[in-house]
Amino acid sequence: MSDHIVPPKVYVGIFLSLMVLTAATVAAAYVNLGQFNIVVALAIATLKATLVVLYFMHARYSPKRTQLVIICAVFWLAHVALTLSDYTTRDHDVAANTQITGQTTRMLRVS
Amino acid sequence: MHRTGELYGQFENLEQQKESAALGMWVFLATEVLFFGGLFMTYTLNRHYYSTAFGVGSNTLDLKLGGANTIILILSSLTMAMSVWASHVGKRKQTTSFLIATLVLGTAFLGVKVIEYKQKFDHHLVPGYHFQIDYRAQHPAPNDDPKEIEAEKEELSKAFAKDPDLNAHAQLYFSLYFGMTGLHALHMIVGAGMLLWLIRQSMIGRFTPTYNTPVEMIGLYWHFVDIVWIYLFPLLYLIDRHQ
Amino acid sequence: MDTPTSTRAATATVYKIPEEHYLNSTYGIRSWLLTTDHKRIALLYLFSVTFFFFVGGIFATMIRIHLMTPQGFLVTPETYNKLFTMHGVAMIFFFLIPSIPAVLGNFLVPLMIGAKDLAFPKINLLSWYIYLIGGSFVLYSFSTGGLDTGWTFYTPLSSVYSNSAVTPAVLGIFINGFSSILTGLNFVVTIHTMRAPGMTWFRLPLFVWAQYATSIIFILGTPVIAITLLLAGLERMFHLGFFNPALGGDPILFQHLFWFYSHPAVYIMILPAMGVISEIIPTFARKPIFGYSFIAGSSIAIAVIGFFVWAHHMFLTGESVYAALAFSFLSYLVAIPSAVKVFNWTSTLYKGSISWDTPMLYALGFIGLFLIGGLTGLFLACLGLDIHIHDTYFVVAHFHYIMVGGAVMGYLGGIHFWWPKISGRLYPEFLARVSAIILFSGFNLTFFPQFLLGYLGMPRRYHSYPPEFQVLNVMSTAGASILALGYLLPMIYLVWSLKYGAVAGPNPWPATGLEWKTDSPPITENFLVTPEVTWEPYDFETRPDLELDHIVAGKLPAPTHGDD
């Protein structure tokens, strides 16, 4: 953390931007964009998160090692999605081939 | 190691202590990112496979309450950032006031969550033995809007047609809903506890422009909890509002 | 116990135990249970991990006795499932993962970088208590019905159908994960911010690099298994459906999330041991290590690439050829940095002045056994081959070569190497060498036959087997009894040495790290004055303070005994 003091008006500005983006994401949810609804929602959320990290959390004014920690965390989070490399290359749709028998909702014994 | 003033014995000077605290908090937040990450991965797969059920589940959430909570939480991030600023410029009273504001907003958030959870409980939407996605549609309360109930019944019948196992899949949605918002709420409760401590310390004048590390560090934590909600809100509340 | 040929520092000084040091600076149980001194915390961990080693060892003993006959005579099949599960859980989560980081890492990292303690000493103590709490939950699980799901807790067996005490166990492992996370966090921050003046990154001992790489894995991997086990536990308690196909869930998802951590976890277990070896080899070859920056870089490379290979545990779950190919290729890739280390260690030995002290025996044993374990890992990474040897004793032998032949030998080598620093005493050298050789022989007799068994088709986790496998199984059990002796002997003579061992002095080997420039045992603050580092690591050739001319000349007087 550096000694750079961020003036309050920057904070208020960021807050207002976050409010606008929140309204935007709610509005976008009411528009049928098909597959892109999720993309838009995540994009707006990521933009909001970026603003919080850069300004509220002072990442913009932090030493390089802090920025490295942030990048690593984001990269690793995205990396969990490597799991999808298995799911998207399987032949069959797991869900479509699963039928719930409804008979095993009671457990034998739980400890 | 003993402490002299604000300097702990293992450190050479306050600068090193502050650097360590900051790096420590950021690394801790990185672990939290990965912790929530597993949940988000589970969510991603389940939403992809059971999009109908997720849409139905999401539409039972009260968007007004969720939206209000989003505003409350982001506002609390603002007040938290302001308290850090106030401690940086030596305004002790303002530091305390902003911290109290943050705590009040955080508590309001948790209060709204309690209301929402109670609603889910009343509508048999808590995963377990009594889960029933169409309970409310079948057993509307006297003060429920009949048009709303009709719309819900229609939505449900369309959904059941698309997905005969809708009940079980919706239960998955709600397991994730409670899991994710519950874990988030737990983090907020811990944050609230830390804010109480901060307020006390601020009131006794512990924070000065040369030493305000705890305010900054707990501020980082609070902003992180806000970021998690920034993702949870669209992912849980805004899945299928456009039908 | 004198040994005529040893590499003890050849001076005329008669060493005494220092007046005040970290062990006697304060007395009483509270001063230990509420300590924030990293060295005392390291010893607290030493006792705890040794306890869990015993627990895991007892289960291993029962397994090996049971497997002496094809039908198994010792326990029922259900109990057998519990034995291998509890052996795995105790050994992996409560011994192997914490051992070197929490014992040697805690003790040495501040000393090696010239700091007074870790960055967060109270969090360090908290880590130990969290470990104990997690361990208590698991012990409770062991004693109230046991666990029969395999240490891998595959669903829906663990989350729905098992009748054993799964819930307290997953809770215990979940809690224990935070112990690791906090230790990793402490190390990363300490290494970044608390190095002494002059201690640049590339002057750090390789042990510290290894701890840093391990800590990256602690930080980024452990949270994922935490959430995974939490979900599995919640599923079991509240009948949720994340991993239960009957409720629309996906067992493969559990496996992905589980292995996302558990594969890097094996690098948590081996990287610190490699760090120990990187300290021992130059010391007992009297040469700077070959390729310092490559060894440092390879530690980070292993930590990073290790996160990309987890699905090689899932080749037989219906993965597509494309996904399997990618993970197989990456698994081969991750072997390269490990190989770099082995080449560099070997090159360090070349033209070195080699002495056969106990730590060196463990280190050389490590190189050989890790080589076999690592190469057999490549066999397993090969898709065509894995179809036949997956879930057989071949896998069991592979990972025991790495975890026991590698990690445990690294741990024991490190304990011996730094024993003088920790206790101020020398262990009995002759007995220690004999013990190392017993351990090495017992180990190979136990686990080499298991490669053959696996290759011949004996599946793992089976309580009985066809009669033609009996000879190899009996050999393995015989080896296990010798191995057990190899573990018991150090426990006895190390304790013995606390009272009767020769006084070691600051630097008995001598070795080049900062930790050897302070007393044995060190004072609580480690150094009277913060050291300033002006030399390169492993600088055996030009450090005047090490008095190496005596040793290099080949004349090695016996160590002198001091009184307390």
Image: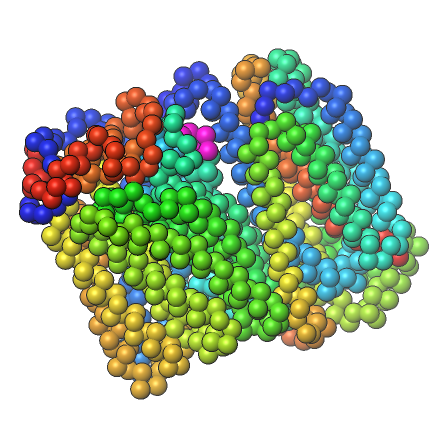
Q: Residue at x 11, y 52 (%)?
A: C430
**In the picture provided, is C293 more to the left or to the right than C564?**
right
Q: Give the position of the N terminus of chain B as an image quadrant.
A: top left
Q: Give the position of the C terminus of chain B as an image quadrant.
A: bottom right
Note whether residue C412 is visible.
no
- The image quarter in which residue A10 lies: top right
Q: Residue at x 26, y 44 (%)?
A: C287
At which x and y percent is residue C390? 46, 74
At which x and y percent is residue C326? 58, 65
Q: Residue at x 55, y 25 (%)?
A: B214
Magenta stretch: dominant SS? helix
> Magenta segment: does it hold B202?
no
Kindly give the residue lying farthest to the front in the view shown. C351
Kindly give the residue lying farthest to the bottom in the view shown. C467
Q: Residue at x 38, y 78 (%)?
A: C455
Judge whether A107 appears above or below B150 on screen.
below
Q: Nearer the viewer, residue C401 or C107?
A: C401
The magenta stretch is C190-195
Figure label count: 0
Judge whether C453 appears above or below C515 on screen.
below
Q: Nearer the viewer, residue C374 or C460?
A: C374
At which x and y percent is residue C95? 35, 53
Note whether residue B163 is visible.
yes
At which x and y percent is residue B81? 67, 26
- The image quarter in which residue C184 lies: top left
Q: Nearer the viewer, residue C490 or C277?
A: C277
Q: Nearer the viewer, residue B137 or C549?
A: C549
**In the picture provided, is C142 more to the left or to the right than B84?**
left
